[in-house]
Amino acid sequence: MQSFQSNMTQSTTPQHASEYSPREHFAFSNFTAAQLYEICLSIENADYDHQKDLGALEDRNKQLEVDLRSASVELQQYAEQIEKLRKEKARLTSDLVEATRRP
């Protein structure tokens, strides 16, 4: 634990700086191990939050799919009811026409 704490305060510059590109060397040499650790924790927390959000969105999507299927069934029932009413209207119209033709 003590070595970890001492590492946390030291720069993360490698012993052989040539192991990294100049850009990587610059990026790593400007942070202590503690700072890099905090950055990693922030990334992990953000990833966790995004995973939670994704889970909530997936749950919402499933609920919307259920609602859509239900609405589709309801719409089909309305269409069938409208068709029955059209047939009834046609029958009543035909009966009315027949009734007006009779003396």
Image (spheres, rainbow, N blue to C red):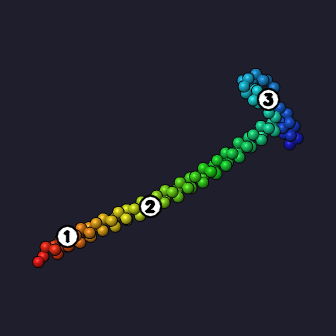
Callout 3 touching callout 2 (CB < 8 Å): no
54 on left or right of 21: left
Q: Which residue is mark 3?
A: 29
Say which of marks 2 and 1 sits in front. 1
Considering only order in the chain, which callout, 1 or 3, is on the residue closer to the N terminus? 3
- Res 94 label: 1
Where residue 93 appears, as percent x and y from the top left, is 22, 70
Label 2, label 1: how far apart the Cα atoms are: 34 Å
Residue 97: percent from left, percent from top: 18, 71
Toward which corner of the image does residue 86 lie, by quadrant?
bottom left
Asked whether 72 or 84 is in front, the reply is 84
Helix, strand or loop at mark 2? helix
Residue located at (81% from left, 26% from top): 15
Kind of residue at disc 2: Ala
- N-terminal of the pair, mark 2 or mark 1, is 2
Q: Judge from the rendering whether residue 63 lies leftward or rightward of residue 86; answer left or right.
A: right
Amino acid carrying label 1: it is Ser
Q: Which residue is painted at 77% across and 41% down in the image?
A: 38
Question: Crowdedness of circle 3 by 10 Å Cα count: few (<14), some, many (20+)?
Answer: some
**Residue 13, image x, y percentages:** 80, 28
Disc 3 to disc 2, C-alpha distance? 60 Å
Asked whether, in this view, residue 93 is left or right of residue 103, the answer is: right
Few, some or many residues within 10 Å of mark 2 (<14, 14–19, 20+): few
Question: Residue at horizontal 67%, vertical 48%?
Answer: 48
Q: Earlier in the sequence, mark 3 or mark 2?
A: 3
Residue 71: mark: 2
Relative depth, front residue between 17 and 32:
32
C-beta proximity under 8 Å, tags 2 and 1: no
Closer to us: mark 3 or mark 1? 1
What element does badge 1 sit on? Answer: helix
